[in-house]
Image: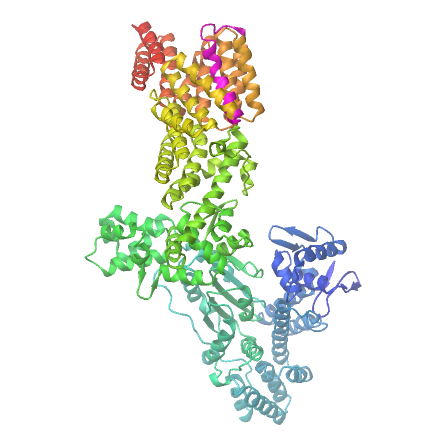
Amino acid sequence: MRYRMLGPLEIGEGDTMWRPRGRRERAMLSVLLLRPARPVGLGELIDATWDTAPATARQQVHSTVHRLRTVLGDETVRTVSSGYLLAADPSDIDLGVFTGLAADARRAAADGRPEEAVALYRRAAGLWRGPALADLDTAPLAVEGARLAELRLAVLAERFDAELAVGGDPVPELTALVAEHPYAERLRAQLMTALHHSGRRAEALAVYRDGHRRLVEELGIEPGPQLRDLQQSILLDAEADPEPRPERDAPCLLPPPPRLLVGREDAVDWLLRRLDGDGDETRILAVCGAAGIGKSALVVAVAHRVRSRFPGGQLHVRLGAPGGAWEAHASVLIALGVPPSAVPAGAGEREALYRARLAGRRVLLVLDDAPDAATVRALSPGTGGVVLVTSRPRLFGLTEAEHLELGLLGPGPSRALLDQIAGASRTGAEPAATGDVIRYCGGLPLALCVAGARLAGRAELPVAAYSERLADERRRLAALSTSDGGVAASLLVSYRGLGAPARTALRRLGALATRPFPAWTVAAAVGEEEVDADLVVDELADAQLVQSVGTSRYHLHDLVRLFAAERCAEEDGPADVRAAAARIFSGWLGAALAAVESYSGDRPALAWGVSERADSTDWSVLTDPLAWLDAEVGSVAAAVHQAHAHGLDELCWRLAWVLRSHLEIRGHWQLWDETTRAGLAAARRTGDRVGEACMLVSLAQRVASEGGCVDDRDAVAAYEIFDAAGHAVGRSVALFAMAEIAEWRHDGDDVRRHFRRAIAAAREGGDEYMAVNAEAKLVRWEHEDDPDAPAVADAYRDCRNRLRGIGAVRQAAMMERRLGMWYEAHGRRREALACFRRSLRDAQLLRDEPGVAYLSLDLARLDAADGRAPAAAERCTEALAMFARHGDETGAARARLELGRLRLAEGRVEEARALLRTAHDRFAELGHTHWCEHAALALAEVG
């Protein structure tokens, strides 16, 4: 397939060409042809097709692409992650052929083969059939059309230079072109030279006078040095020199190079590799990154290193706000010799003169702090040059550019930068404090530079004293600011560039999000139903104010968080922040409830009278609830403490209540204790008796689960509160905890009494999960006098099946284990092994490492009984390590007991004695008399 776009758009094969009928097809195909084999974003296709996009623009793009595929094929128009891609070779596109021929002609001229160069230039010019993209009038395609027109003029000018060098006569073509482009001084100079070489000196001078008149009368400027010098040469009848004089007309506007550039070696290499070589097309290299990341320093440093390659000038434009192209055009024109009074007021005339002045030059243009892709395109030269762009937002729409994103500095480069500014002897004298300063700066070069400058300017200030100021979050931004800027001032620019919803979200997340947060919290922070959270997050991410840390999870750099929190304190009232906190924490509560209910069968919300199952707006919760809880447990725990801090007491204790079951599975004993105590304080502060009772039960369950509780006072106090409130579900939970504590005391009467009452209360309150759990736990104690009865195994199987039926996977696995232990006690090791393996599979599925550890001990006993002592010892050693990771002292003592028995059987007496003694003493400290007796009997065998 061949494509012709240097004139009316045509496609075809062989000699048969045709024009796409629909305007949308022509517009989208033109954009794809301008970026062959490179992704084109959906937004760019929409912008190129409509100046004002309809609501159905996305759907229309998809349908238009489908129509293009029916002609070009699915393999030619491909869907990629960022949009679409046209898989076409540049040699199949007349624009690609044109640029290739021009490059070949340029090489031929440079190698001293002018006749060949002229022939190649003529072949290139012959490919044009009319204005490119002339029938497509949207703003982006109009800009591209103007760029291609400039490219054609530049190549034509090169061709005329070559023809003049071999004695050709391009006067007729030049006459027409000068009439068409009266302000193009290079073409006018070539026409004057051609006329003068033909002996038509008077006509050549007339061409100059016409150009002078037009420039003065119509634009208010004098001709440039090239035309003026040429006129003087003709007047003196000297040999004309059509080439410009760079020394008089090649400004350098670059700011001074940075004194320090640390940790950016890879970025410098990336830019330098792409600055090698020449070419007709403008190359755009875009560097983006957060405020203060060092973009400008990098680009200016590289620009100074390559400035000699750009004889047409090295220009620097500071942009900032959208619409800056209009002022930038003026500043560049003035730098190129246009008097300020002669700069056109109209945007179109100003841009036309800007492009005319840059035509034919090889310039390096630095566009610093570009706000958007449109501004970059409006300022990019049409031919031969390089544009270095810096921007805070990611310029996704600038698909013709190559992109580099700067990240934070690592610890090593951060230290090197601080050393160079503050002095290595200064930082080396206080290494610990210096490390703290680096940590508080968070790898942000601007912060490190300010910190270094403050230390360098205050020789009497100890690094430790400055570090203490940074440690105070209320003072950190002030300590990283200067009279003329600093971190906060730099972030303020990015903040002001956001839309209102994004600014609100950033402020409130800064005040409330201390950890990575999911996208849904953004909408909750703003509190407006019509806000699209994904769009707001995209805006914040594009502005480099949040960083992605996983699928739909984001993070605020500490300095951004502190800045946002300060803005929140200034711009949001306490009631607004509290309302936002309530929405966010309610979202966490709903998500955590949905996760816990979906894998455990537990119904925590029954404690506050909600019988319906929870729902969550975060679909990842239901996709893999355990993975969600593992990822977000820290965020939910932080929400507990933040809810307490904001006076959202009911949310505080409810979050703690829901979280407890997962903390038990993962053995997070300290986090469980901390969140429960925060919830207890919140409930008591507001006088919420049900909340207080739930937290008391949670405290009792935590200590009982860790295996160190023989005191049931918290559980009893909770029971009394629930009983007084007529709260049946609450009574059942408290009675269940009292029964578990009685188990540790081996008080069978209390165990049976409490579990029976718990079953009755659960049935009364409609809590099937608690009722079946209590029945399952009661089986062993109901048959304490006859543990060998087949009814015991039947009861275990029944409870296991019922627990599986309500989705209580972990509890069902525990029943499977109890059934295995019953089989083991009756010498039915094969059935025991099958039960233990099924239970182990479930424990591994739940990533329940403590459960895996206990089952490892069970399997070790079977290995030992079957004569596989080494395998048994290996299982016990692995279990001991798992218990140690989770701080499960009872489990660790059990592992030492089993391992001690194995070592004794192997004749390793001293090792066995040490293990058994440690296990015995720990059981005694924990008050586990039953296991203490087992350890004592084993020690007696040692002697």
When the figure is inspected, residue 216 is found, relative to residue 530, above or below; the finding is below
When the figure is inspected, residue 231 is found, relative to residue 13, above or below; the finding is below
* Magenta stretch: includes residue 771: yes
Relative to 515, is 94 on the left or the right? Answer: right
Magenta stretch, main secondary structure, is helix
Rendered image quadrant of residue 903: top left
Q: Nearer the viewer, residue 264 or 324?
A: 324
Q: Nearer the viewer, residue 931 or 752?
A: 752
Residue at point 46% right, 69% down? Answer: 319
Residue at point 31% right, 63% down? Answer: 482
* Magenta stretch: includes residue 65: no
When the figure is inspected, residue 921 is found, relative to residue 102, above or below; the finding is above
Q: How many marks can you see?
A: 0
Rendered image quadrant of residue 940: top left
Q: How is the image coloured?
A: rainbow
Rendered image quadrant of residue 130: bottom right
Relative to 170, is 618 on the left or the right? Answer: left
x then y, percent, for residue 586:
47, 43
Residue at point 37% right, 40% down? Answer: 686
Q: Nearer the viewer, residue 272 or 870?
A: 870
x then y, percent, for residue 200:
64, 92
When the figure is inspected, residue 410 is found, relative to residue 136, above or below; the finding is above
x then y, percent, for residue 184:
59, 81
Whether residue 884 is visible to the viewer of this picture, yes or no, is no
- Looking at the rendered image, the quarter that the N terminus falls into is bottom right
Residue stretch in magenta: 765-790
x then y, percent, for residue 514:
40, 46
- Looking at the rendered image, the quarter that the C terminus falls into is top left
Relative to 179, is 556 on the left or the right? Answer: left
Whether residue 696 is visible to the viewer of this picture, yes or no, is yes
